[in-house]
Amino acid sequence: MKALVIADGSLSLEERPTPEPAADQVVVEVAGAGVNRADLLQVRGAYAAPPGWPEDVPGLEFSGTVAARGPGCRWIGDGDRVFGIAGGGAHATHLLVQESLCAPLPDGLDPVTAGGIPEVFVTAFDALVTQAHLKPGERVLIHGAGSGVGTAALQIVRAIGASSVGTARTPSKLERARELGLDAGVVASDDMAGAIGEVDVVLDLVGGDYLSIDTAVCRPRGRILIVGLLAGAEARLDMGTVLRKRLTVIGTVLRSRPEHEKAAAMADFARSVVPLLADGRLRPVIERIVPLDRAQEAYSFLHSNSTFGKVVLSAGG
């Protein structure tokens, strides 16, 4: 197999032994694998892989065909099309992963583009539905509406019957987001709270000083989900506002969770999200597909912050 290997802050495509599955593991011949900001951080040495996952091969999501399976697998068969999440190692032609982190890939989805689905849709659904308990008729603020998680969240909000307001750095991203169900768009600025209006739930994919905006726009008993830290890991929090409005502030991340929690999130994804992907009510938003042997181009493109939706590596599987 070939794997994208990190060495001294750079990437190279190298030959590695193809793994063999044991117990409830499967080997997936990868067709497509999304590139995420966690991958950029891992290359820089700022985000280590969880224990048990490859330390020097990035990649948190995948789609492909089962090439081999362990004797403890319950539902996966050889040759099945699957997609799912991983703690690392997906930027390769083959991936060793637990069966519980996979879901069946619907027939109508292209296996390459589907490699950009799991991480963002699992993250968005888990934050909005499982943790924030989003209800029909509520209003959701999404910071970073043009990001991978943002484009997934917009569609989930629409499918639930809630409404959305999104922020982005450029009007063009907000215009593209309207096609996904964005009801109101606000160009990001220091004084954007007034233009946003009141909301029930905030999906904050930016972090930093955006937290002060989150608390200002939330209605009483609002829920704030902090998912990304692109603007920094520190912020000023007006605790008086949090107390007065009885706000809930939740920090959430997917990659570093225990395997059983990630498996539970994948089960929710398979049960509630995959059927909507199968019938077209939800869809992957892919900005660019790049061959695995040109992965540095994909990484650089994501780092530029000019992307709308996902960048996906095509592994040729």
Image (cartoon, grey):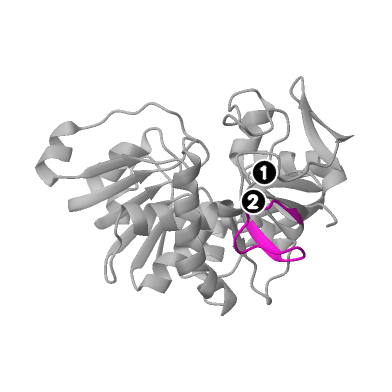
Q: Is residue 123 above or below residue 136?
A: above
Q: Residue at x 44, y 61 (%)?
A: 268
- Image coordinates of residue 153 in percent, x first then y, are 46, 59
Q: Is residue 8 above or below residue 155?
A: above
Circles 2, 1 touching at the beta carbon (< 8 Å): yes
Mark before the other along the chain sequence, 2 or 1? 1
Instruction: Please give left or right for residue 152 compared with residue 240 in the image.
Output: right
Q: Tag 1's secondary structure?
A: helix
**Residue 258 percent location from the top left of the image:** 47, 38
- Sort mark 1 into few (<14), some (14-19) or many (20+) by Cα contacts within 10 Å: many
Which residue is tagged 2?
307
> For residue 81: magenta?
yes
State left or right for residue 91 relative to residue 245. Answer: right
Front residue of 145 and 67 = 67
Out of 97 and 23, give the one closest to the viewer.
23
Specify the quadrant of the image occupied by residue 65.
Answer: bottom right
Single out the residue that lies furthest toward the left: 244
Instruction: Say which amino acid is labelled 2.
Output: Thr
How many residues crowd around disc 2 within 10 Å: few (fewer than 14), some, or many (20 or more)?
Answer: some
Residue type for callout 1: Leu
The picture places residue 61, in percent across and down from the top left corner, at 64, 50
- In the image: residue 108, left or right of residue 14: left
Segment colored magenta = 68-83
Q: Which residue is mark 1?
A: 302
Look at the image and say whether residue 241 sits in the magenta stretch.
no
